Amino acid sequence: MVSHADVGTVIGWVLEWFDQLGLSSDFGEELGGDWVVEERVVADEVGAAEYAVAKSLTSGSDLDPVHVTVIVDSFVRYLRDIGAIGDEVL
């Protein structure tokens, strides 16, 4: 069974991954500024799921990797639906 707290933890891991890629900013900072890790950054569902599953396994969580992947997929779909993320920009 997956709890609300579990969902919050997995979402936190996805946001942490976004931060590590340079796809988040502090209030007032320009997104995609000089601090971006790589010149071309792509955040996709597979990368987010891989990161979250790895965090789950290394943190000692009893979450099943399938549950983690479903949570990540649902969260990324939600972010797309609200326009927070979109397709690759060239």
Image (spheres, rainbow, N blue to C red):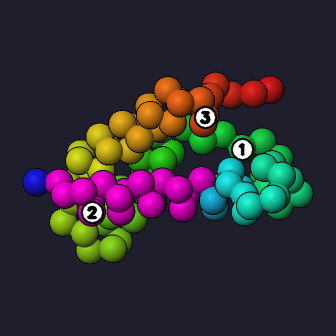
* Residue 62 percent across, percent down from the top left: 18, 66
Task: Check the image and name the residue furthest to the right.
Answer: 34
Extent of the magenta region? 2-18
Type of amino acid at the residue the image marks with label 1? Val
User: Badge 2, how many Cα within 10 Å: few under 14, some, many 20+?
Assistant: few
Instruction: Give the Cα separation between the discs numbered 3 and 1.
Output: 13 Å
User: Could you say which is closer to the camera, residue 75 or residue 45?
Assistant: 75
Looking at the rendered structure, which numbered label has been put on residue 50? none
Q: Is residue 49 above or below residue 3?
A: above
Q: Residue at x 63, y 59 (%)?
A: 19
Q: How many marks?
A: 3
User: Would you name the residue on which mark 1 appears?
Assistant: 41
C-alpha distance separating marks 3 and 2: 24 Å
Q: Is residue 39 magenta?
A: no
Sequence-wise, the earlier of marks 3 and 1 is 1
Residue located 41% across and 41% down the image:
75
Amino acid residing under circle 2: Ala
Q: Please identify the residue farthest to the front as the structure is shown.
A: 28
Above or below: residue 30 compared with residue 56: above
- Answer with left or right where residue 19 lies relative to residue 82: right
Report the side of 59 relative to 20 (left or right).
Answer: left
Disc 1 from disc 2: Cα separation: 29 Å
The circle drawn on residue 85 is 3
Mark 3 vs 2: CB contact within 8 A: no
Q: Residue furthest left?
A: 1
Q: Position of residue 26 (x, y in %)?
A: 72, 63
Q: Which mark is residue 5?
A: 2
